[in-house]
Amino acid sequence: MLKARILTSIVLAAGFLAALFLLPDLYWALLMLAFITIAFWEWSGMSGMTKPWRHIHTSLVMLIGVVVVLADEIGLETLQPQVMFYSILAATLFWLLAAPIWLMFRFNIRQSVLLAIIGFVVLFPTWLALVSMRGISPWLLLMVMAAVWIADSAAYFSGKRFGKHKLAPQISPGKTWEGVLGAWLAVTVYGLILCYSLSLTYWVIIGLFGITVLSIMGDLLESLVKRQAGVKDSGCLLPGHGGVLDRIDGLTSSLPLVMFFIYFPTYFLVLESLYA
């Protein structure tokens, strides 16, 4: 299992890096949309939807994504900033307000329509963040995603080796506080390397701590949805990892909020310009 996990990670990393630095913007957006669409399919399965409704739900998400990508070409010049603004704002409110309450009280939401809406709020802004952050700089996106993956890997291995105190036993029995500490230690080292090599302020490390907390929250939320759906993995596409959603759960909670704080100083100016 560990060998399959490592091999899959190597293949994914190589393919991701090639796409990140070589693909034109349009192809990158469509490739990320394809992955997010697969994640939507997995989420809709855990939501209890029947297959016909899963097809409709997933196709609708893909259609919306394509329209957003091609908005400028079809004469909808203001669509992209509007969708970006409201989607990232919705994701920020969800992860800072709704998700902690959901995790704290472990609400068992089985209404498929409500879960589908939550899935949209979780996944669609993730796609927008993947596209927008890469538009700012592929290196920025890589650094943020690397922080999530480093934290995830460190939590996994340190939890396996030293884990004794359960983090959320009723949600994900395998996660431990020792794993969290291992993740924080790993991202601290990562942050120090970034600060030293790129002459960045040490406040970056505080930001990485926040990204780590958010990624753990995303991981726990997906674990809760899986547990309530009675499944071990969201899918079986990625050997050793499960489904696409299992691989990106930490990104769904961290990338949209990073985008929000990048744009926060200008967000209300953007909103004003949209309706000027």
Image: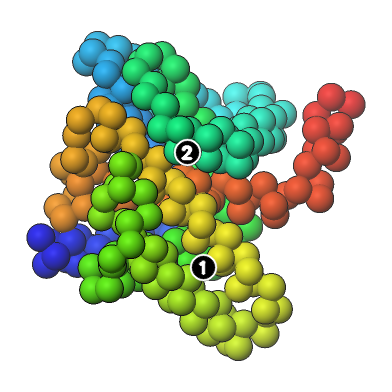
- Disc 2 versus disc 1: nearer the observer: 2
Give residue 196's position: percent from left, percent from top: 60, 88
For badge 1, the amino acid type reads Met
**Residue shown at the point (51%, 57%) measured from the top left:** 213
Residue lying furthest bottom? 196
**For residue 252, above or below residue 13:** above
- In the image: residue 101, left or right of residue 27: right
* Image quarter of the N terminus: bottom left
Residues at badges 2 and 1 in contact (C-beta under 8 Å)? Answer: no
The foreground one among 197 and 160 is 160
Q: In the picture, residue 35 is in which quadrant?
A: top left
Is any part of residue 214 visible from this angle?
Answer: yes
For badge 2, the amino acid type reads Met
Give residue 210's position: percent from left, percent from top: 58, 60
* Image quarter of the C terminus: top right
Kindly state the secondary structure of the residue where label 1 is placed. Answer: helix
- In the image: residue 274, left or right of residue 24: right
**Residue shown at the point (25%, 63%) measured from the top left:** 9
The foreground one among 38 and 101 is 101
For disc 2, the marked residue is 104
**Residue shown at the point (44%, 17%) measured from the top left:** 114
Give residue 251's position: percent from left, percent from top: 45, 51
Kindly state the secondary structure of the residue where label 2 is placed. Answer: helix
Residue lying furthest right? 276
For disc 1, the marked residue is 143
**Residue shown at the point (26%, 35%) measured from the top left:** 227
Q: Residues within 10 Å of mark 2 (few under 14, many from 20)?
A: few
